[in-house]
Image (cartoon, rainbow, N blue to C red):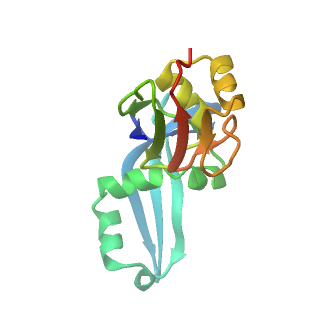
Amino acid sequence: MQQIVWVVQYSTPPLALKYCKKCQKKTEHASSGRFRVNAQGKYLDIWLIYKCKNCRTTWNLPLYSRIKPESIDNRLLEQFYSNDVSLALQYAFSTWLLQTNGAEIVLPDYQILGPHPDSGTTVELQITSRYSLPVKVSQILREKLGLSSRELEKLITDGRIQNISLKGLKKCKLNQEITLYIDMSTPYK
């Protein structure tokens, strides 16, 4: 059995679709990669700053609200103060955080890195992503294998593509990892 790993790599963090007061309509907001830390008395507020793509007006995505400085790890606090790039990306890729703060998600472009399966074999395919974005597994398979929706549906119906977790493949979304088995013993097109 051939084992293959595909890595889904996103070009940018997702955009937040949110109402902009200056534009007076819903617009796309992009993460600036910068944090705002505000100290009021004994408490801290920490935000990730987003900017409207049309007018550059800022929107502060709340990360921590009214917390005591001693309740947060000193290294983490220093990362906020220094606008740590990897920490900003981690928060910018949090679709849950965006949605709980009233933003809709605009998925970024992505690439699927990894080899194509060899024909004539059974393949154990592991699809991974560093970040958890709601991209359909069926869409990834169609793009990488060059299949139409109908061709993919036939492979699933015939049992030639199987999901190890037994989730429905047509609607299943890539969390951070999924393993599939693909029967490539006969041509799939």
Quarter of the image holding residue 37? bottom left
Quarter of the image holding residue 83? bottom left
Kindly tell me whether residue 28 is visible in this rendering: yes
Q: Is residue 138 left or right of residue 32?
A: right
Please tell me whether residue 183 is drawn above or below residue 132 in the rendered image. Answer: above
Please tell me whether residue 48 is drawn above or below residue 161 in the rendered image. Answer: below
- Residue 39 coordinates in the image, percent (x, y): 43, 73
For the point 45% across and 25% down, the residue is: 120
**Which quadrant holds the N terminus?**
top left
Please tell me whether residue 79 is drawn above or below residue 3 in the rendered image. Answer: below
- Residue 46 coordinates in the image, percent (x, y): 46, 65
Q: Nearer the viewer, residue 43 or 74?
A: 74
Kindly tell me whether residue 132 is visible in this rendering: no
Q: Nearer the viewer, residue 147 or 14?
A: 147
**Which quadrant holds the C terminus?**
top right
Q: Is residue 106 left or right of residue 73?
A: right
For the point 50% across and 50% down, the residue is: 176
Q: Is residue 138 left or right of residue 4?
A: right
Please tell me whether residue 14 is drawn above or below residue 69 in the rendered image. Answer: above
Total marks in image: 0
- Residue 68 coordinates in the image, percent (x, y): 47, 82
Q: Nearer the viewer, residue 177 or 130?
A: 177
Q: Nearer the viewer, residue 82 or 134?
A: 134
For the point 36% across and 34% down, the residue is: 114
- Residue 165 coordinates in the image, percent (x, y): 63, 52
